[in-house]
Amino acid sequence: MARRFVSIWFRYLVTDWFALRQPEFANTAFVIRAPSHGRMVVTAANALAEEQGIHPGMVLADARAIIPALQVLDDKPELVDKLLKRIAEWCIRFTPFAAIDLPDGIILDVTGCTHLWGGDQPFLSDIVKRLKARGYHVRAAIADTIGTAWAVARFGDSFIIPPDQQSEALLPLPPVALRLEADTIERLNKLGLRQIKDFIGMPHSALRRRFGNLIETRLNQALGLEEEIFQPVLPIEPYQERLPCLEPIVTATGIEIALGRLLDALCKRLQKEQKGLRTAFFKCYRIDGKIEQVHIGTNRASYNVKHLFKLFETKLPTIEPDLGIELFVLEAPKVEDHAPLQQKLFETMWGLDNVHLSELIDRLEGKVGQNSILRYLPDEHYWPERSVKRALSLDEQKSIEWKLDRPRPIQLLATPENIEVTAPVPDYPPMNFRYKGKLHKIKKADGPERIEQEWWIQDGQHRDYYSVEDEEGCRYWLFRLGHYDEDYKWFIHGFFA
């Protein structure tokens, strides 16, 4: 497929921006000024000022001599970069490939996009119409190369260049349309080469000797003989699906239909490549320029359309379409290999390998919050609070076996809590203890189980653990820190079932 590019030229970018924020200047000649070499210079002029002879680079005093009532505003550093970046991000609704073209333009790679609008003409007209409605003076052109689109947008009369006709479109244009340096343009004009057709047929070696390498590069780029670097303003996700809308979508049913189509297209591609998504973002571009989005995450790579739709379904009510959504985008920034597990003929797969289990966890987390359901594995540490670690995924395997030779409480406190005990006896559990203001009388006990600290982590006292049961039948896990002949303390560390 031949590539197609759109160049958008904002002839009065900065002054349009100021006029939008200060409507009183809309029908007044005004300029933007900035200091340069000890004097004030005009950096931008609006259309009314330009019609009366004011142009960028002019000394402000000379401009005021031409228009005594000229309004003057101070320039804002870095305004152009920020403004073009914002407009380029807005243009994502037309194509995922939008780049800044300093100092006053945007470049769009629209390959394979224009048919969604019915062709090049409706596509280009829609872009221009929307930008003009936002208050900007714009000209735009579409061609096979960035160089030709740029030249025609600024100096051409016909803004839609058919495929493979960039040479014919460039012939009547001035040399400045090739984005050449000022001194090169001046030399070309002095030699009477005032149109591209005057020198496009010359040997490139002669052009290089007389005007440098840039003129050859620009000609080759404009004619499609040399590729031009294109850097999108936003990185493109390798797994992305887009769905533009001919009419703005404002209903929940319409949003669900759009999501279903995008999921179906993306999951078919993932399945074909034996991959599955782990995270996905559903973005809705509204007419007013705002973006509504929701995202999901899975515990295991998946391309199950029904399952992924259910995860999104609980979050769709948070999307506010307002006046309407004109573009839907589904992105999968995190994708992993996903080959279907081989099923055994006479056995049912249970446990962590069961796909239904991971999907159940995904749905529960979608309702109660991400990372609210955790999995733990045994770790090589002695102290109980260090003897487990959080698993990174459902597929992570344990490096050591669980220790099942001694009883462990079903609920373990993250940090042991201090308790008060009475009638302690050396190497025996206490007769009773007080925890959170309540006195517990111990009827049964088992222990002690001594657990030492790891000397390579920290030096300290050992613990003597006891499993105890109070008169109400509740069971607790207590320990004494240190020997009786030392400054020992008692703690509660867990609760048995």
Image (cartoon, grey):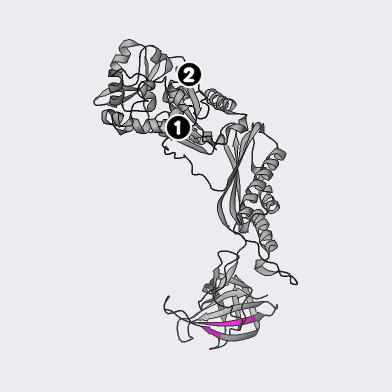
- Say if 429 sits above or below 189 in the image: below
Please tell me whether mark 1 sits on a helix, a strand or a loop: helix
- Residue occupying image coordinates x 57% and y 75%: 492
- Residue occupying image coordinates x 31% and y 33%: 213
Q: Dot 1 corresponds to which residue?
A: 146
- Residue occupying image coordinates x 27% and y 26%: 36
In the displayed structure, does residue 41 sit left or right of residue 365? left
Q: Dot 2 corresponds to which residue?
A: 157
Q: Which region of the structure is painted magenta?
A: 449-468
Query: Residue 3: percent from the left, percent from the top?
Result: 51, 36
Q: Quadrant of the N terminus?
A: top right
Q: Quadrant of the C terminus?
A: bottom right
Foreground: 304 or 397?
A: 304
Please tell me whether mark 2 sits on a helix, a strand or a loop: loop
Assess whether mark 2 and mark 1 are in contact (beta carbons under 8 angstroms): no
Picture quadrant of residue 224: top left
Q: Amino acid at mark 1?
A: Ile
